[in-house]
Amino acid sequence: MNGFILMLPLFFIRFVLLGWLNSTALKRGAHFAPMAGAQKIMYVLYQMTNVVLILFPLFLRVHGSAPLLVLGGVTYVLGVGILLAATISFAKPNEQGLNTAGSYRFSRNPMYVGYFVYFLGCAILLGSFFYYGALVLFQIATHWVILAEERWCSATFGETYDEYQQQVRRYL
């Protein structure tokens, strides 16, 4: 099976489902906070690794031993589930426009957690060391993007976000 098939749920969840649940959430999901200093470089790395993680599977096939296929499949399905829950929660911000309910009660960045688990499942199923390497770079860059988002959220939502930040972990 061509590896790109693994990307179909990502496109459906990120664009079709999110747009169906809340059309303005599509715009919010595409918004990136202003980057400063090294964050600008990491933002470029983030975008480049996104392209690699999404398009490189076009050239790969799902393969591996039975235990790896099971581990990859379970990880992949878990990632899809986390992305679904995060997307549904993201589509329902509070009156201020801040997401604090649903999966955002457990993580300030459940969608990024979902992306990591999802792409990790893909990496296991595809068995590509290059893909694993791209995922590591993606995670490093994502952390820097999140730091910029947190700075923007604090400036935009003020004390409400600062309190939320104290109560809910960044990742898990």
Image: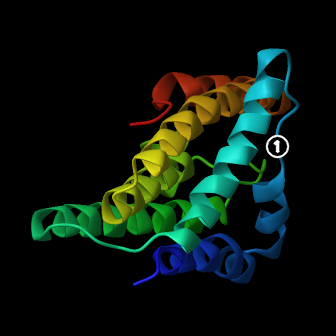
For the C terminus, give its image quadrant.
Answer: top left
Instruction: Tell me the residue at 58%/62% (across/down).
Output: 56
Instruction: Tell me the residue at 39%/56% (across/down).
Output: 123
Residue 59: image quadrant is bottom right
Pinpoint residue 70: horizontal percent, then vertical percent: 17, 69
* Circle 1 residues within 10 Å: few <14, some 14–19, many ≥20: few
Classify residue 137 as left or right of residue 128: right
Pinpoint residue 97: horizontal percent, then vertical percent: 77, 51
Pinpoint residue 166: horizontal percent, then vertical percent: 52, 21
Q: Nearer the viewer, residue 45 or 155?
A: 45
Q: Is residue 10 above or below residue 129?
A: below
Q: How is the image coloured?
A: rainbow
Q: Is residue 91 above or below residue 9?
A: above
Query: For the view shown, which residue lies furthest in the top direction?
Result: 37
Classify residue 66 as left or right of residue 10: left
Pinpoint residue 7: horizontal percent, then vertical percent: 54, 73
For the N terminus, give its image quadrant.
Answer: bottom left
Instruction: Tell me the residue at 39%/52% (across/down).
Output: 120
Circle 1 — which element?
loop
Give the residue number, with chain letter if any, for mark 1. 32
Q: Nearer the viewer, residue 57 or 22?
A: 57
Q: Amino acid at mark 1?
A: Phe
Instruction: Tell me the residue at 82%/43% (across/down).
Output: 32
